[in-house]
Amino acid sequence: EQPSISVNPAHKTAKINKNIYSGFTEHMGRCIYGGIYDPGNPLSDENGFRKDVIEAFQEIDVPVTRYPGGNFVATYHWLDGVGPKENRPARPELAWLGLEPNEFGTDEFMKWCEVVGTEPYLCLNFGTGTLDEALGWLEYCNSTQNTYYANLRRKNGREEPYNVKYWALGNECWGPWQVEQMTKEDYAKKAYQWAKALKLLDPSITLILCGETGYSSWDYYVLKQCVKWDVHGLGGDRTKSLIDMHSIHVYTADKEHYANATAPRGAERAIQMTSALIDLARIENNVPHTVPRPTICFDEWNVWDPVRAPGELGAEESYTLSDALAVSIFLNGFIRQARDMGMANIAQSVNVISPLMTTKDGIVKQASYWPYMLFSRYMRGWTIPVNVRAEEYEGRTNPEWIRGTIETPFLDVSAAIDEKGEVVTLAVVNVHEEKSYDVKLDGIPSGKQVDVYTVGGDHVQAGNMGGKEEVKIVESKWDAKDSYVFPKHSLTLLRWRI
Ligand code: AHR
């Protein structure tokens, strides 16, 4: 039976939050120092910011960037990183066992965000940090009042507030590797109290609860304890929420291509499960429907295997075409689940587990850079449903539980229509290593001029590190007919005006 894809541009199902294309920069390995910040390098600007990295962020149009961790944040004191650089202390760093010089801190990050055109998202220290310190950071960033930390910001050269909207209530607080690992009971109690205080200080912020994978008892418990509405500070307002998003993290990887490329289907299932837990918490807590429903902040996702990754900390990944297809399937999942997605942050954005690698003399755009760039550029607006009939991959999956919970077709498809409702983009990942599929297409009028973007390479292990350029985008035009041949191991975007 011929595979088929049918798409209906008239039927928009959910708005795609552009923040699903967000990034993450942690004080880890060469992400900050030698990544976005490289003073003295001829490729850097007067602030010490790498211009080639800035250009890549702008090419992708990264809407929001998370900072400063990650695990790093569990011992980070933001006051160490502000004020005259000569007075800033160097500290031992306990997440990655490095030394933190604190040359790059809050004001540098805010400046970098302004230069790039990305919005900051700050993660609070739930390890060794105090609530006072967190409130101080919020005041420093956002307050217009005549108060101590707002004045400290002014003294440090910044009159206007930074208006940081996104704040995370800790990072992976459940993890045994975490300084001050917490039980779910301890975390929920603390997160609720901190959330209340932070919103009293600045009710305009968006608060992100620390979840796990989205399908754990931690996720269930912390949502149940924190997704409530009748709290002090919100004054029983039935249109306000204390917790605005729930964060989840999933990294995937496998040595074998099919298990590797299909693994992000598990991440999509995780989104569905998180969504159900959010509903369950609201139902069990009798949250009025007028209170905004928390969305999902998938603030760490990517292909990562610390064992296979060379370089410092097992984090300097060398990505293959197989990984680029996995990244494409992650992104297809975010489009399909757009209704629940408030944000997603590729982890990370530079050098560490990243599609972008810097050297002293330039930048490498790895295989996975291209799908990320294409999705961010073209898959915005609204998600539209697709019906797909395709051969199913029935081999081993990673994790194993994917099998039986969600399908793993060789053709993984999503579609979007732009904001104005004029241009449709169909994203098709063909995971198959040997077969190109001739697919019957329904919904693209015959004869339409279609722009085609294909990301591919000679084999699934092709990559761009080490001076190679084996995985890239090929652009072409196509006069639409009844069917299109999607090449083996490729991502194809078909884009037409309706
Ligand atoms: O992104 C690398 C690390 O992975 C982050 O610091 C942490 O949150 C996760 O375990």
Image: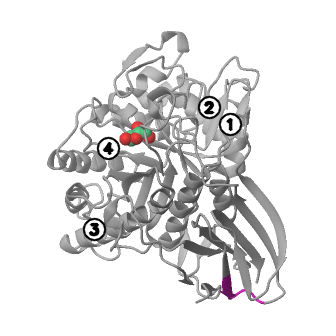
- CA gap between label 3 and label 2 equals 37 Å
Where does the magenta region start and end? 439-445
Mark seen at residue 255:
none
Q: Where's the N terminus, which quadrant?
A: bottom right
* Residue on which the image places disc 3: 277
Residue 298 x/y as whole percent: 43, 56
Q: Is mark 4 within 8 Å of ligand 1?
A: yes
Mark 4 lies on a secondary structure that is loop
- CA gap between label 3 and label 4 equals 18 Å
Q: Residues within 10 Å of mark 3 (few under 14, many from 20)?
A: many
Disc 4 marks a residue whose amino acid type is Glu
Residue 234 x/y as whole percent: 30, 59
Residue 396 x/y as whole percent: 39, 63
Contact, CB < 8 Å: mark 1 with mark 2? yes
Report the residue at 72% width, 35% height from top: 467
* Residue on which the image places disc 1: 53
Which mark sits nearer the N-terminus, 3 or 4?
A: 4
